[in-house]
Image (spheres, rainbow, N blue to C red):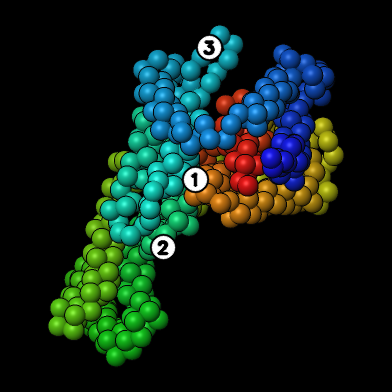
Amino acid sequence: MARTTPLLQRIDWTTVVIYLILVVFGWLSVYGASYDFENPTSIFDFDQRAGKQFVWILTAFAIAGIIILIDAKIYNYFAYIIYGVIIFLLIITIFIAPNLRGSHSWIVIGPVNFQPAELAKVATSLAIARFMSSYNYKFRSYKDLFPLLGFVFLPMALIILQRETGSALIFLAFFLVFYREGMNGIIILLGLLAVVLFVVVVRFSENEFGSGSVGFLVAMAIVLLIQLVYAFVFEKDFKQGAAVFFGAALIAIVAYFLFFIFEIKINFDYVAVGIIMASSLFWGVLALFFRKKRYWIIVLISIISVIFCFSADYIFEKALEPHQRNRIMVVLNMKEDLKGDGYNVNQSKIAIGSGGLLGKGFLNGTQTKLKYVPEQDTDFIFCTVGEEHGFVGSIVVLALYAFLLIRILTIAERQRYAFSRVFGYCVASILFFHLTVNVGMVLGLMPVIGIPLPFFSYGGSSLWAFTVLLFILIKLDSERK
């Protein structure tokens, strides 16, 4: 009878140690952020946030232990059931959750506030891993993507109905998993293109060039550049690419002279659209006559881009909430609102900058201790790290996260079963998205959307969700042989 390796020897202790370091460092940061110079309290004072966080940490450790002891097969077998339960919980949350700062996403049970949206990430990861590990599943066509989109967009829609847009956006991280498993990368590139066009159109919408908008003209120039890059680099069609380039340049020059020299009224927005439509027609003709079906990709992307750019201002003005518009305008330097929507980010940058190279020392951060930074122990916890431990401390924390992500990817790649591999990539993608967005908004590089820093931010829902994600992966890895 073959011997089996003891469980403790099969656990990836490197990942566990990194997790423990991050959790302890986060706990100390919560204590530092909530510490009061005039009324100092113990880190174990359960009336204060540091003491409460200690309780959350202990419960998270208990949950991690239970996950390790449970048979790993249960996560695969009950993935759809877990997903269904969480979806039901998200639905009833919309109706029973109280209004807390404008959102209906927290279920209140006595002294405990719990956010089901956090566990939805775990449930969606399990459901996606189960579906993508089903017999002979592969990305053969876009039809294979549709069920996965259902798994992602259903909880997203329910969380948006709870008025938690930031938490909903995290589910876009699953597209990184789909790409790893065979989804065409053009879908991610189209998403990035939409973001770039939206930012350009909105940011420079008020800047005029003649009778047109600078933002719209630059956006159309980007679309034309994409056409030329596709022709020159991917298709190697230099003659056709050159024809489009010189044709567009000729139309632009003629329009310029008619407007500025002969003073004929011309809307340059329509000139830019005309150039894109003419070039798209050119690629369509080539696709028909020379049977180059791939040229239809250029035509489709160009037409969708034009429609999207025309609707960007409407989306910005009508679809977004006022506070969301203001936060985007602050990030894009369209307005300076240091006492309103830009206050949090401005104070955060001041706190981080005041830390210098080595920081002011533990419990010596004046910006955070004097409560200049709102949400300093939750969404803006990273500014406490920057102020107290400086640039060096911030780099150490980011290095720990990078090491953890690399370790998770390593674990995912060595799995023998598709379920474990896909789940591992779900964990890595969610952590990466959280880290990037949270640090980006604290540094003023992204709009403030209110998502926690994994293992650092105060709160039990977040800590539990990330612990469950990580330790399910550790358990699956321990059973890979």
Give x and y (percent) for residue 309. Answer: 29, 58
Q: Which residue is located at x 40 percent, y 81 percent? A: 233
Q: Which residue is located at x 23 percent, y 79 percent? A: 292
Q: Which residue is mark 3?
A: 109
Of circles 1 and 2, which is in front? Answer: 1
Which amino acid does the dot numbered 1 rest on?
A: Phe
Say the numbered circle drawn on residue 419.
1
**Quadrant in the picture for the N terminus:** top right
For the residue pair 8 and 5, the one nearer the viewer reads as 5
Q: Is residue 233 visible?
A: yes
Q: Tell which circle, 3 or 1, labels the residue nearer the N-terminal end.
A: 3
Which amino acid does the dot numbered 3 rest on?
A: Ile
Question: Where is residue 87, by image quadrant?
Answer: top left
14 shown above or below 99: below
Q: Secondary structure at mark 2?
A: loop
Give x and y (percent) for residue 183. Answer: 39, 58
Say the numbered circle drawn on residue 295.
none
